[in-house]
Image (spheres, rainbow, N blue to C red):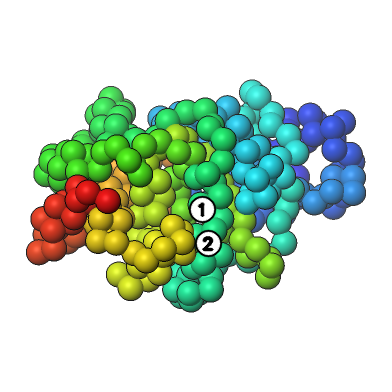
Amino acid sequence: MAESLDPIMVRLVPLLGELEGEPQALPGGITNRNYRVRLGAGDYVIRVTSPDTAFLEIDRWAEYAAALSAGRLGVGPEVAAFLAGEESLVTRFIPGRPISPEEMRDPDTLAAVAHAVRTVHDGPPIPGTFSPYRVVEAYARTAAARGVPVPRDFSPANQVAAEIEVALQGGEHLPVPCHNDLLNANFIHDGARVRIVDWEYAGMGDRYFDLGNLSINNDLREEDDQVLLERYFGEPCTDRRLSSLRLMRIMSDFREAMWGVVQIAVSPIEFDYAAYSARHFARLQESAADPRYPDWLRGATARP
């Protein structure tokens, strides 16, 4: 058995039953490690946290509450246990497979994804808050305190972020429960419905960060964004909504770029976080230099 699972299994066996077979490491994950285990008659996933994840602005109790809510809403796996101390979340294993970026462009798939995301946003409030504008600033402070130079790209990116923050205020930007990490691997389709996993960045925030994050993480084209918004809101896409999503695509890249910078300092996982950060800064700069960027700022502030 993986050594990191020993103290966790000591606590889980009395709760969920005897271990059957060996834990199976699941692929993916550049923050934590995940294992599939059979305990008693149940099939579960154990998330083993990496040390120092608090530096990534992760609140494990808020994650636990968000995962519980998602499970009750039917858009997340059922939570079986949360082990304080180890900060390990244990959920029911969901049969199915991640939705690939190519599949995400299918209108029917986008409709199912939009329904799942809207269900989260319409759900009851959850603990914690998430503001991409404050998160990137916190990441910059953490990186500097841990001896990692803040990239020169941070300052001009933060100026762009300030413009976006001014544009996206009130109305549909008021806080709702958000996931805030909508990578394609976090959507599991079992053939009947879509469920969302990995709630560690969840908090009350702007729904458009989720929509923009979903869009850019899955390489959606502008026409795909229009379909996403139409399915999400249940009515034709407007310029104001599309502009808001396009601006939050930029904030998603900014968060990812600075997340990579902090990971250089705190992560024990072998991964090229510097290259990861550079890629997201480069795409951010490309988006902010798009001749349509001023139009997005104006469009996002248009009256409904």
Q: Quadrant of the N terminus?
A: top right
Q: Position of residue 195 (x, y in %)?
A: 62, 56
The one of 37 and 138 positioned closer to us in this rendering:
138
Front residue of 202/283: it is 202
- Can residue 224 be seen at all in this image of the molecule? yes
Give the amino acid at mark 2.
Val
x and y percentages locating residue 103 in the rendered image: 50, 74
Res. 100 visible in picture = no
Q: Amino acid at mark 1?
A: Val
Is 24 left, or right, of 174 in this rendering?
Answer: right
Q: Residues within 10 Å of mark 2 (few under 14, many from 20)?
A: many
Q: Farthest residue toward the front? A: 304
Identify the residue under disc 1.
117
In space, the residues marked 2 and 1 are separated at their CA atoms by 6 Å
Q: Residue at x 36, y 37 (%)?
A: 174
Q: Nearer the viewer, residue 175 or 14?
A: 175
On the rendered structure, is 2 left or right of 110? right
Q: Which residue is mark 2?
A: 113
Residue 276 location, quadrant? bottom left
Residue 210 drawn at (x, y percent) = 41, 50
Q: Residue at x 54, y 58 (%)?
A: 115
Q: Are marks 2 and 1 in contact (CB under 8 Å)?
A: yes
Tag count = 2
